[in-house]
DNA sequence: CCTGAAACGGACTGCTGAGTCCGCTTACGG
DNA sequence: CCGTAAGCGGACTCAGCAGTCCGTTTCAGG
């Protein structure tokens, strides 16, 4: 890809905007047709840039996932592993729940964009908190994220912070 | 519906058996074709008895939901509302998680077969426990079930009891 | 301005799954 | 054992969605 023609660049931008909006509204179920229509292009145009729907989704959520990785790395560099865990969860939840639809996409994509990296970092944050006796350790580090995610996604619109508190209370050692 | 011809009754039974198995295995995503094939009938036969897929699902899960209603009513007649709540949750969870696929169907169906009734009973169980100061009361009774359900469904196969304990610990006053 | 490569977009394919229809089959009462 | 209504089942319609193809349009450099 040397350079993008001006109209192509414009359309690419429109597609990404429309896709972001659509995925935010409908999660992974948003259809390519719907996105193309909203962007004012034919859906062939979408597929030229993103060979599959998942590729488009990766492009849309990459920024989010990367941001979460940064937060995790900050948590890992803290010298209070317990507090770091709770701060980390709150920050990531805030980010995820600002656009629940997109977060469903992150879950849907699993390891693909940088999900594996994020998982690994998150698990290390948990493991450190457990070693510091700030968290119950009968759950494995890998199990903590699904539990928290499930609680967040199950909450009615305004209530996710409360649901999160309940689960975090249950997780404390 | 006066009487059912012998072959019809036989087929109806086969369909219900196959549907139960299929829904248990795949949740609400099981297809009518798949069920009809497993039952050894054409899918037209399925639709004659159950005009829509949901109707078939209702028939399959009705027994489950009714059973849960009974458990809820027992809990309501206890004179220790706190303990009754925890016993109730454990029993319902045991029932639901014995066939997670069917439970997904129950959730999918929402109010239809007797879901509204079950919700109401469950909420009363919660409310009584809250009044007895056995449960934190910053959640509304209607919010408790979704939270617990989410935790159960998010658990890896063998771990749902642990996930349940975590959430229940978080819910205690 | 003029041309060719890049980009476009919509018609098309292929798939899956719900729900309908109707000609054929079969149970069962007389 | 026979007539008929109940029952059967698969071919069919309809809809939605991912992904492909190709004739047409448009950008941009010479």
Image (tube, coloured by chain):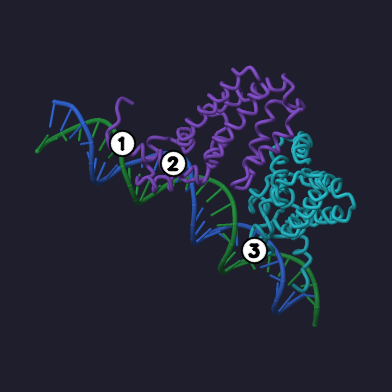
Chain colours: A purple, B cyan, C green, D blue
Q: Residues within 10 Å of mark 1 (few under 14, many from 20)?
A: few
How far apart are the two marked residues, 1 and 2, measured between alpha carbons?
A: 16 Å
- Residue shown at the point (77%, 74%) measured from the top left: B2
Residue C19's image quarter? bottom right
Q: Identify which residue is drawn at 49% across, 42% down.
A: A23
Q: Which residue is mark 1?
A: A8
Q: Quadrant of the N terminus of chain A?
A: top left
Q: How many marks?
A: 3
**Chain letter, disc 3 residue:** B
Pointer 1 or 2: first along the chain: 1
Disc 3 target residue: B51
Q: Position of residue B138 (x, y in %)?
A: 71, 46
Judge whether A35 appears above or below A73 on screen: below
> Would residue A146 appear left or right of B72 to someone viewing this image?
left
Tag 1–tag 3 contact (CB < 8 Å): no
List the residue tagged with mark 2: A19
Q: Is residue A166 left or right of residue A28?
A: right
Depth check: give the residue in front, B29 or A100: A100
Pick the residue in front: B122 or B138. B138
**Marks 2 and 3, how far apart at CA:** 37 Å
Across and down, in percent, residue A49 comes to: 38, 35
* Along the viewing direction, whichever of A167 and A29 lies nearer the viewer: A167
Q: Are marks 2 and 3 in contact (CB under 8 Å)?
A: no
The quadrant of the picture occupied by the C terminus of chain A is top right
- Where is residue D20 drawn, in percent x and y? 41, 39
Q: Residue at x 53, y 29 (%)?
A: A112
């Amino acid at each position: 890809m040397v350079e993008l023609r001006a109209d192509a660049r414009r359309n690419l931008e429109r597609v990404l905007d429309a896709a972001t909006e659509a995925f935010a509204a409908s999660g992974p179920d948003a259809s390519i047709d719907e996105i193309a229509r909203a962007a004012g292009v034919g859906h062939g145009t979408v597929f030229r840039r993103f060979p599959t729907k998942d590729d488009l989704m990766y492009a849309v959520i990459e920024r989010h996932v990367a941001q979460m990785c940064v937060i995790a790395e900050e948590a890992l560099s803290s010298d209070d592993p317990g507090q770091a865990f709770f701060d980390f969860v709150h920050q990531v939840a805030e980010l995820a729940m600002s656009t629940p639809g997109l977060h469903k996409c992150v879950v849907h994509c699993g390891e693909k964009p940088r999900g594996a990296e994020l998982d690994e970092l998150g698990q290390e944050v948990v493991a450190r908190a457990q070693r510091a006796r700030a968290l119950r350790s009968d759950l494995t580090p890998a199990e903590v994220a699904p539990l928290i995610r499930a609680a967040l996604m199950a909450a009615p619109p305004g209530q996710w912070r409360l649901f999160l508190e309940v689960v975090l209370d249950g997780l404390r050692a």
